[in-house]
Image (tube, rainbow, N blue to C red):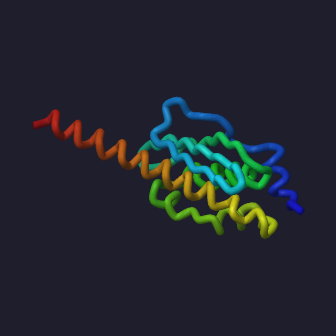
Amino acid sequence: MYNTSVLDHFLNPRNVGCLPDADGIGVIGDPDCGDYLKIYIKVQKGKLTDVKFEIFGCPAAIATSSILTELAKGKTVEEALKITDLDIIEALGGLPEPKIHCSNLGAEALHKAIQDYLAKSSKQKALQDAKKD
């Protein structure tokens, strides 16, 4: 049912864990299948220098989250925002049709983490600007 790439990322997931000092956090869940994903990002000079995840989910959800971290790490914020569900599926070499929805979690959680980072960055900039006045 699963190809070797999916099985490899399920059995040996990359970048598992949390980042206590994360610059952005994105959380998403799928109540229909019970999957729950939390993505953590660290950003320096506009690039994602670290991406980690915690998940409760099926093998496909674990594999898609793992490959997502590899796709996102080292990308600029703008490049990471362009990662899609299709990019994740293609990077894994495909998923069985009933498991395609699992790829939706990763891209959306990553985008939420980036939005969280951007919101925090805007607040910090506003505070710094206010201190200058």
The percent coordinates of residue 37 (x first, y second) are: 63, 46
Farthest top residue? 20
Horizontal and vertical percent position of residue 123: 29, 42
Which residue is at 85% across, 53% downward? 7
Residue that protrudes farthest toward the front in the picture: 32
Residue 68 versus residue 21 in the image, above or below: below
Total labels drawn: 0
Q: Residue furthest right?
A: 1
User: On the rendered structure, is 79 left or right of 15?
Assistant: left
Question: Which residue is located at x 43 percent, y 52 percent?
Answer: 115
Compare residues 49 and 103 and report the one nearer the observer. 103
Say if 96 sits above or below 7 in the image. Answer: below
Task: Name which quarter of the figure residue 55 lies in.
Answer: top right
Q: Position of residue 64 (x, y in %)?
A: 71, 55
Q: Residue at x 83, y 45 (%)?
A: 11
Q: Quadrant of the N terminus?
A: bottom right
Q: Is residue 15 left or right of residue 45?
A: right
> Is 69 left, or right, of 95 in this rendering?
left
Q: Given the current orientation, which residue lies at the most extreme left position?
A: 133
Point out the image quarter for the C terminus: top left
What x and y, as percent, mark residue 2? 86, 60
Q: Is residue 107 above or below residue 26?
A: below
